[in-house]
Every structure is written in C-alpha cells, then in structure tokens.
Amino acid sequence: MKPIQSIFDQFRQRGARLTPVRKAVVSVLAKSKKPICVEGIGSCLMRLGLKPSKVTLYREVDFLVSGGWATVLDLGGGRKCYEWASEHHHHLVCKKCNRIEELDAHEMESSFVKFEKSLSRKSGFADLGHSLEFYGICNRCQ
Amino acid sequence: MKPIQSIFDQFRQRGARLTPVRKAVVSVLAKSKKPICVEGIGSCLMRLGLKPSKVTLYREVDFLVSGGWATVLDLGGGRKCYEWASEHHHHLVCKKCNRIEELDAHEMESSFVKFEKSLSRKSGFADLGHSLEFYGICNRCQ
DNA sequence: AATTCTAATGCAACTCAGTTGCATTTGCAA
DNA sequence: TTGCAAATGCAACTGAGTTGCATTAGAATT
C-alpha cells in the first residue's frame, strides 16, 4: 500500500483539496479489510467525530473512484460497496445477511490476467478487469 | 435444457398456476442468450401481445428465482438481470453502455467447482455458487 | 494577514428500481 | 358449476443514489 502522503500529493495535482472528510474517507477505505458501503463509511467517520451529509459521502466516493483510487463492487446487497483500489481481491458473500469475507484466491488471479489478455484481443473490449465473487449461506444464517 | 413441459409440471406441484404471463416469461428467459432485466422481459412480452404490469413482472421473476428456476445477476448497471438457471455462464460487461456478452469460460469453471468444495469446508458457508464477470469498455464506447 | 478563486458542503427536492397493501380477477380442482 | 387460493393491477410507498443552488472553506497569491 502506498504511503498516504503520496496519495494526498496526487489529490493536489488534480486540483483537489485536503478536507477533513476526504482524509478520513481515504483512511477508512485504505484500512478497511472488507469492501464497505457509503453508510458504513458514514458510521466510521462518526466515530472520528465527523458527521458529513450523505451527499458529501456519495460525492467523495465518486471522486475516489473516478480518480482510480477506489473501486466499486456491486455484490447484490442493494447498496454499492467500495474498496481501496490497490486491495483488489475476491469475496465470499452471504446471500441472506450480506456479510462479506475476504478471500485468498491468488492462484486463480494469475490465470485471469492471462485470460483477460486473450479476451481483450478477441472481443475488442479495452481496459479489462474482472470480478469474482462466491455466494453462499454463512453458518449464522443456516 | 429441460423440456418446458416438465418445468410446468414442477410449477403445478408447487401449487402455482400456468398463467399466460408465467408461460411467456419462462419461454423468454429460457430462450434468451443473455441475462435480461425486468424491463427487457416486459418488451419481449409486449411483442407476444401481453402487457403485464411491472408489479406482475417483478413478482414473476421472484417466483422463478425463489424456486431455483432462474438466477439473479447484479452486473452493476443499476438494474438486476435474470437468467435461466441451467444456463450458468460468465459475462463480459461494458462499463459505459452496460452491453452484455456471453463468455465461454468452461476451462475456469471446473477449477471453481474444486475451489468451492474446499471453500465450503474451510469457511462453513453452505450452498456455494459463484459469479465471474469481466468488465471493460466495448469497441463502440471506446 | 487579507484577498480571491474555486472546490467542497448541505439542504431540499428529485429520480428511479423495486416493493407493499388491498381490492379484483382468474386458474383450476372438486 | 362452484369455490378457494393464486395471480393481477393500481396507487402509494421505500430507499439508494442524484441534482440544483446557495453557502462555506481550502489554499494559492498578494
């Protein structure tokens, strides 16, 4: 993971400012082990003494995603989740309670990268990425 | 793909009725080569001379999903997509226009099944399934 | 330190997919 | 043919996410 100061430098180069909310959202996302939704980010900031409006939070994650610092995940729980971009991995999601567990699937990862290259050639799609998620019922919900 | 008549028998055993809308939705889903959203199903039925309300369509796909005949896909386009359950495969989705292409990834499929078995043991999650989608920008949108 | 420009913020009102309550219609079994 | 429960449609609702606009506040310049 990159030092947080270099991220802030990138923000400045983009003409963006270092507001308390922005710094806090970055720190929450970068430290979170799991993808986290806007509501979740809100509660974390609350604990840090910040109470931004939901509008601000949505605009903040948009900013981070459009700049490539964060990525969106649509895991089917009715709300989008976000994760720090350098933390790309796969997940295990409970179909009932939407609990998310991080997954170690590095073995598979490499084969995807290969597959993606040939896919890009064949299909004409650019800027390829992928999402692999496993869904099931967690022990609590069974 | 199972003969459509045996599907209808399964419906009856469940106490469900064979309404014109139900038959049409099944035929549309079972024949569709791509995942299709409720709005898309609606247009197909329109062409068949049926104009069910959106409420009916949502209830119909719920019925099919809860019975295991169809599966939901959340591909991030803002609306859920549905596919006939026996047609499990992976997709290539355009991040801009949300166009969906079906993908042949059978080689990978088998390794997932293996991975899922060990995952089920380790994690305690039951009823495991997965979703693998590739996202990029299609040639039209580039 | 004061000025200035523009990014960031909050409010309120909105959009849009999907849901729910309730009265009516219809499939189908007896 | 009758009667019950499933299916339907309407209208009103929910809840995530968005937008317009006026206000506040980083941070660069003087």
Image (cartoon, coloured by chain):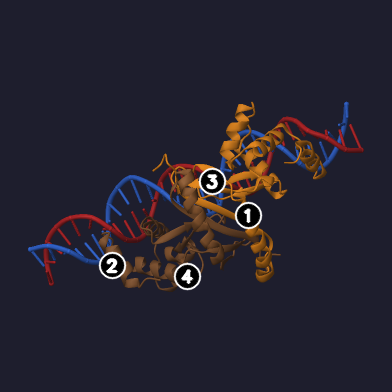
Chain colours: A brown, B orange, C red, D blue
Residue located beneath label 2 in the image: A9
A82 lies left or right of B50: left
Amino acid type shown at disc 2 = Asp
Q: Is residue A48 above or below residue A64?
A: below
Query: Residue B79 shows which numbered tag?
Result: 3
Q: Quadrant of residue A136?
A: bottom right
Q: As rendered, which of A140 and D11 lies closer to the eye?
A: A140
Measure the alpha-carbon separation of dots 2 and 3. Answer: 37 Å
The chain carrying label 3 is B
Mark 2 touching mark 3, by CB under 8 A? no
Does residue A40 lie above or below A78 as drawn? below
Mark 3: which secondary structure?
A: loop
Mark 4, residue position: A32
Above or below, A6 against B81 in this view is below
Asked whether the beta carbons under mark 4 and mark 3 sit within 8 Å of each other, the answer is no
* Spot occupied by residue B38 in the image (x, y as percentages of width and height): 59, 40
| Residue type at numbered disc 1 | Glu
The three-letter amino acid code for the residue at tag 4 is: Ser
Q: Is residue A76 left or right of residue B127?
A: left
Residue A105: numbered disc = none
- State the separation of the CA atoms marked 1 and 2: 43 Å
> Looking at the picture, do discs 2 and 3 lie on one chain?
no
Residue B6 shows in this picture = yes
Mark 1 on the same chain as mark 2: no
Gap in angstroms between the C-alphas marked 1 and 3: 26 Å
Both labels 4 and 1 in a single chain: no
